[in-house]
DNA sequence: CTGTTAGCGCATTCAG
DNA sequence: CTGAATGCGCTAACAG
């Protein structure tokens, strides 16, 4: 049974109100009393109950990180991890806690995630990996609960977003390849239920066209952001278009799948076929040849999301969209 | 302002007591009343406040996941991620929530982590990545707060642990190499502030000796569980002992570093030098050549930790140590 | 500057 | 079977 504010009050010979005020830094408490209270609280190792405080303030200073498809064996989360760090770090700085919510866990699917949030009285949520066709998407966007979604450009009265400039990123990649002399550049995209896929496709297309290279739909393969999908996409494109000298992948994981195929097929990278990925997950630097890719500032995305959310919650800022600029990282595959 | 139990009571024409009992499944409430209350609660979309409930029950049904060195750019966490999933999944099944605590964040270093836990009134904690020389280790072990540590074999009245059988795992690896005909087998270990390092070294040694191969300390290099450390360790060992035909690494990340060196040095794997890692992170299957390694059941470790902790918290089980058996996964590097 | 009074939303005695 | 009263630990008017 932890020591409560009453224990401190008793020990200090004052009322609990005074203790509360002294500890919360209110100015209307005598300097000597404050010192004494602080000292006694310290001696007693008093820790104010966040629970009790939450009940009265109606704020938990806790935000939820809602991840769909957080599950065993899902490697895509390597992308998410740095975002999580960014969120966690910034929230800690701001004095908030983070609770992890897997939106696919059975217990939590029985009730809506929003219901879960109101049960826990979360102050806000950050949502990641939501598919465009997920009905929950509109729930969260329209909900009165402050929220920030990652990588889905939607703004409402209570919902902001953070994303990378995916059009720009894709352009960086393709322009880089064009600069290297490539003219027949394939594109292995992710599934269309991710908003970023559309942008990356657009960037790919626009970069080509702005260099006078016609966009050819048959050079685009829609995979699913997995290693295996990337491998397959690369194989299909190369089989159909042997003249292709470079492939741009909408994720590093897919690019790595592509590299697998190229190695098996005995194709030299980058000499016979250049490869550029997207994300710059740690893996990109570890595989060999090291992957040229488009770096998303994932940590910053997380930190920005946290910051924006807290700003909204505290009424200091309006919901908005924030887009971070990715950058080209040239390594060995191009 | 969410709907409270009073709103439900009023709407149902009963007292809040009755509502509370009906919702919590107490048997002492009339069947028709219960039905009516349930229906009305549903209509009103009532969600009981976890905060208020926590205040009165003195239980938050929230546990903390304390991670040291959770930070930007730390790739080792790929190992931790599956453990996190296991924890999260099992806790969700058991009706508990997980709050992520980075024990290196400045704000939280100002106060002891245990103080943080009492502030938040956490019901228990799971701790990972604690170094043996971290003073906090004893704090958590001796603390009255129920806890489970990962990969440190310490048991107290309130603290249990979960780990892999690292001696056995290392033996699996070395026996496998010996079975392949290797006699001069190097070992790149992790730093000695991880309990697992000692066990893996012991397993390495015992496996050798039980096959009549003398243990040679000069074949052991103590690195730090990083890619770069593994690369360096591999290089040093090979330079000093060109006759070495196999290297066992205490982690996959280090093994991958070793592979980098071997590739640069033009050493064929596994023909000229076999490599075995430890962990079986997803990476092991993605790099090429694919890494032979010792699989730790990371998801199960997390799930077990969660289960054990909840058992302790609910007074159903005593703190204990649980050791999971790893298994050999043969791929291309051996 | 300090204490008294009221709740925050809920679970739980104890009476009816 | 149901309700009135009590308190979990804390903050916030409102008085003095």
Image (cartoon, coloured by chain):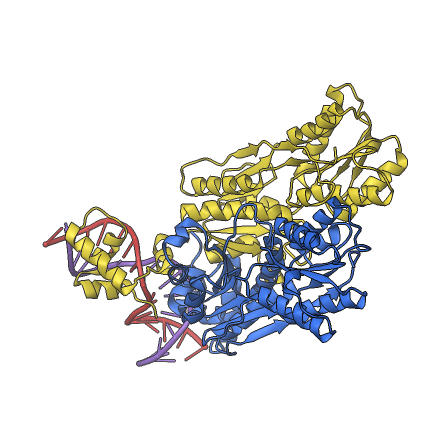
Chain colours: A yellow, B blue, C purple, D red
Is residue A226 in view? yes
Q: Nearer the viewer, residue A155 or B223?
A: B223
Left/right placement of residue B279 relative to residue D10 reads right
- The x, y position of residue B316, in whole percent, is 51, 79
The total number of labels drawn is 0
Q: Quadrant of the C terminus of chain B?
A: bottom right
Q: Nearer the viewer, residue B138 or B86?
A: B138
Relative image position of residue A9 (x, y in whole percent): 21, 62
Q: Looking at the image, is A284 positioned above or below residue B299?
A: above
In the rendered view, tell whether residue B108 sits above or below residue B328: above
**Residue B105 place in picture, x, y as percent:** 44, 50
Position of B5 with respect to B271 (left or right) is: left
- Is residue B250 visible in this depiction of the protein? no
Measured as percent of width and height from the top left, residue C3 is found at 16, 60
Front residue of this view, candidates B232 and A268: B232
Which of the 4 quarters of the picture holds residue A100?
A: bottom right
Q: Depth check: A331 or A300 in front?
A: A331
Residue under the image location 72 percent in, 50 percent down: B259
């Amino acid at each position: 049974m932890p020591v409560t504010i009453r224990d401190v009050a008793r020990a200090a010979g004052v009322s609990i109100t005074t203790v509360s005020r002294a500890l919360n830094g209110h100015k209307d408490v005598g300097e000597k009393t404050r010192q004494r209270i602080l000292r006694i609280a310290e001696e007693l190792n008093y820790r104010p109950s966040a629970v009790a405080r939450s009940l009265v303030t109606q704020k938990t200073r806790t935000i939820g990180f809602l991840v769909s498809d957080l599950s065993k064996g899902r490697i895509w989360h390597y992308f998410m991890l740095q975002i999580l760090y960014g969120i966690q770090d910034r929230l800690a700085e701001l004095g908030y806690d983070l609770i992890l919510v897997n939106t696919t866990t059975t217990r939590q699917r029985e009730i809506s995630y929003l219901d879960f949030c109101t049960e826990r009285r979360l102050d806000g949520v950050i949502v990641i990996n939501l598919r465009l066709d997920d009905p929950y998407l509109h729930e969260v966007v329209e909900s009165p609960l402050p929220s920030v979604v990652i990588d889905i450009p939607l703004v409402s009265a209570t919902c902001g977003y953070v994303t990378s400039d995916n059009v720009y990123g894709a352009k960086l990649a393709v322009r880089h390849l064009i600069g290297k002399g490539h003219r027949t550049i394939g594109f292995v995209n992710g599934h269309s239920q991710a908003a970023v896929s559309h942008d990356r496709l657009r960037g790919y297309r626009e970069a080509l066209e702005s260099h006078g290279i016609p966009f050819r739909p048959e050079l685009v393969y829609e995979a699913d952001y997995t290693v295996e999908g990337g491998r397959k996409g690369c194989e299909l494109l190369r089989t159909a278009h042997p003249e292709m000298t470079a492939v741009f992948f909408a994720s590093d994981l897919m690019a790595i799948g592509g590299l697998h195929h190229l190695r098996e097929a005995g194709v030299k990278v980058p000499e016979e076929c250049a490869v550029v990925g997207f994300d710059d997950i740690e893996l990109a630097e570890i595989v060999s040849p090291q992957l040229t890719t488009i770096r998303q500032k994932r940590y910053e995305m997380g930190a920005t999301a946290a910051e924006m959310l807290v700003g909204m919650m505290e009424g200091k800022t309006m919901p908005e969209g924030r887009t971070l600029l990715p950058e080209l990282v040239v390594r060995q595959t191009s």
